[in-house]
Image (spheres, coloured by chain):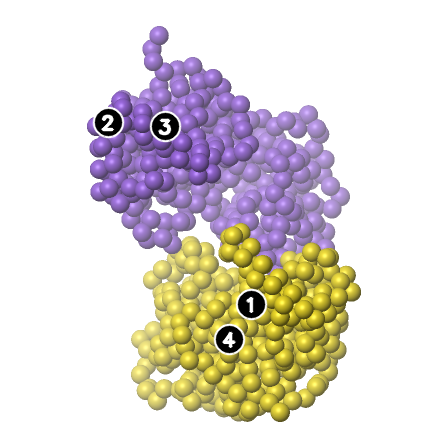
Chain colours: A yellow, B purple
Amino acid sequence: MKLKIGIVLTSVPAYSETFFSNKINGLIENGMEVILFTGSPLGNNRNLPYEVKEIQVYNKGWLVNLLHVIKACLKAIFINPIRSLKMLRYELADGVSILDSFKNVLVCQSILSYRLDWLHFGFGTLAVGKENVAKTLKAKMAVSFRGYDLYITPLKIDGYYNKLFGKQVKYHVLSQEMCIDLEKKGVERNHIKVITPAIDTSFFMPSTKGDKNDKIQLLTVARLHWKKGLEYTLEALFHLKKMGVDFQYDIIGTGEEYERLMFAVHQFNLSDCVNFIGKQSQEQIKHIMEKTDVYIQYSIQEGFCNAVLEAQAMSLLCVVSNAEGLQENVLNNETGWVVPKRNPQMLALKIKEVIDLSETEKSEVRKAARLRVENNFTLQQQQKKFIEFYNSDH
Amino acid sequence: MKNPLKIAVYSGEIPSTTFIERLILGLSNKEEYQILLFGLKHKSSVNYNKNVCVYAYTSNKLSKGLHLLKYTILLELFKRSEKKRLNAILASTEQDSLNNRVKYYPVLWHKPDIFHIQWAKSLKDWSWVQDFGIKLVLSLRGAHINYSPIADHQLSQVYRENFPKVDGFHAVSKAMKKEASQYGAPLNKCRVIYSGMESSVLKEEEKKRNSVLQIISVGRSHWIKGYSYALDACKILRDQEVAFKYYIVGGLNNLELMYQIDDLGLKSHVELLDNMPFEKVQKLIHQSDLLILPSLEEGIANVVLEAMLLETMVLSTHCGGMDEILKEGENGFLVPIRDVRALADAIIKIIKLSPSDYKQIIGRAKKSVCAQHNVNHMISGMSKLYEDTINDNFSDSSNV
């Protein structure tokens, strides 16, 4: 019988989010049925090989919200009465207040209408308030942690995941480091499965063009968010410039910290050698990577980081921080270099050291990086691991 | 009796920030002025002097609608041609919206002699007042000058186009004046007038040093305040086994800071606190041994002036106009911006100060603020600026 998997995500994976689309496609190709539950409905009518259902988000003004509440109430009474009642009982038994219990039941109506074998929450935060849905459906529950949801969001509220951690859940994390940190929070080791992200290694292939750059080309691909450590990176480049290195640094990505970073560029007097080139397509990123000498990912917090995998697949010399999964993504002195985070002077010295390596030494690292990605981080391997994930209990 | 000079002090909000309210109060103590306040009125009310006239609306649509209706009728009946002229200007600058009319019509009707804008970003919106004989004065303060135009090229372009047309400038520091001149603000029309501070209400309480160094920072939860650098410095202190407790007032729920505290293992050393009433902040500053201002840019931070008045030692980054009040080692301490090591070293240096040196420095700090940031000086400086703006008396480059 076909295994039916419900996946909860914030939105339908964008075209560039290969890891999500690849995972889902892999499941379908292997005879599983996938239903995607998401907070934001499908924007344009893309032909997707799976069903997409909207989970109602109550943030659209009181009148619209009221209509949705009425609709959800009718659904709870006439379509899912037994399941709704059952979930309500579970919520109350967990000590959730009556009002919040009702809210949680109403929010989950679109999921409660389905019969599922697995209910998989794509981010830990998405499972909060929905901890009893899988049990109600007699489905198995899975939760993925990707970084921010494990390390940052819970800082806001004490015991944010207490209810979740008390449930029978199979967890997916991106790195061994995350696995250890999740264990520290009381989750049993045999309930956690590490599946690293993966990339299309046939697309991210090193260039055969041997053009030499006039100046050292440095690159980071990152959302302009504080967790990406770009302010520290710019400080490191300030030191690098003082060492007399002639370089050009490009940052691909957009985000809320643009003003902060532009101001840092101004204060570090880097305006002539730093470019914010905004969001770029996969093809463009590949094209820019082809011209890059050193790739930098000096994040403060990082689950694993696909961009670093792509950079290694492109045989770039990668210098990264030791934030969580990054030190597993890049093997220090083998496939790149790992520098302790929040230490810009050390980062500057490391970049200088890498630039000064002999061509033979550089070539060894480039090859090792490409080889390791080819051997360990392909889309096919990721697909296989996810199929195993759903086919085995623990 | 001579008609009072009508001055509109415009920040867009009523009541405004502490220092703008202080300016309004100081100006309204002078009988020769009538102060006009336009804009959005918040719930908290202020008892202004009699010569302060408030022409405000609240945030609900009905209040705005009635406000617009009243001034549309008045202008239509008594100043029809001027209303028509304003509408034509608005149409030509693509600013003709109901929201703008709500803001602009009362100003056109009451026609102040001087329209004093407190925040530079709104300058372009108000350039039309000059077409009706109203003089335009702009205050140069905060983010609007310091860093916003650096990331926003469009804004810097707007400044370059409009600054040369402004009739008079008030800069909160010499550094701010210099910064504004880069956008074409004529130096001779720009007066540095330092913010006036009221002497502390806690002055009678004697200053005591704590057994464990108590450090405080106060400010909005924003990257410009440089708190991430302060936390990195805290890690150095902790690694060197320095005993301290650091409070960041206004930093509560800032995820970046929360994560950094957690990441660096500083939970027992650092506490993020919510915003609190001014009196409570004053008390906390007074109880602290050291106030640090790790900012990346500032005008002259009011919180530093407060701390100096409250006899709390100040360590600030050398940014903006901070060196116009702080003299290294004399009345406080200065370190370079974005320099974690220097910040940590300076804190250690301050810990090692002898009680007599500590006392002398905080004593001198208080004196410097009283001398430089006097409310009377601020008001007389502002009066002179208004007078010179009205008479276009800026031939020399004299300064206050």
- Mark nearest the camera among 2 and 4 is 4
Q: Confirm whether circles 2 and 4 share one chain.
A: no
Report the residue at 36% width, 67% height from top.
Answer: A277
Mark 4 falls on what kind of element?
Answer: strand
Is the C-beta separation of discs 2 and 1 under 8 Å? no
Q: Mark 4 lies on which chain?
A: A
Q: Name the residue under label 1.
A: A55
Q: Name, please, the residue furthest toward the front.
A: A78
Q: Is residue A238 above or below residue A394?
A: above
Labels 1 and 4 within one chain: yes
Q: Name the residue located 55 percent from the left edge and 32 percent from the top edge.
A: B44
Amino acid type at image mark 4: Val
What quarter of the picture does the C terminus of chain B occupy? top left
* Residue highlighted by disc 3: B70
Q: What residue type is labelled 2?
A: Arg
Label 3 crowd bin: few (<14), some (14–19), many (20+), radius 10 Å: some
- Contact (CB < 8 A) between labels 4 and 3? no
Kind of residue at badge 1 = Ile
Residue at the spot of label 4: A52
Nearest the viewer among B228 and B349 is B228
Q: What element carries label 2?
A: helix
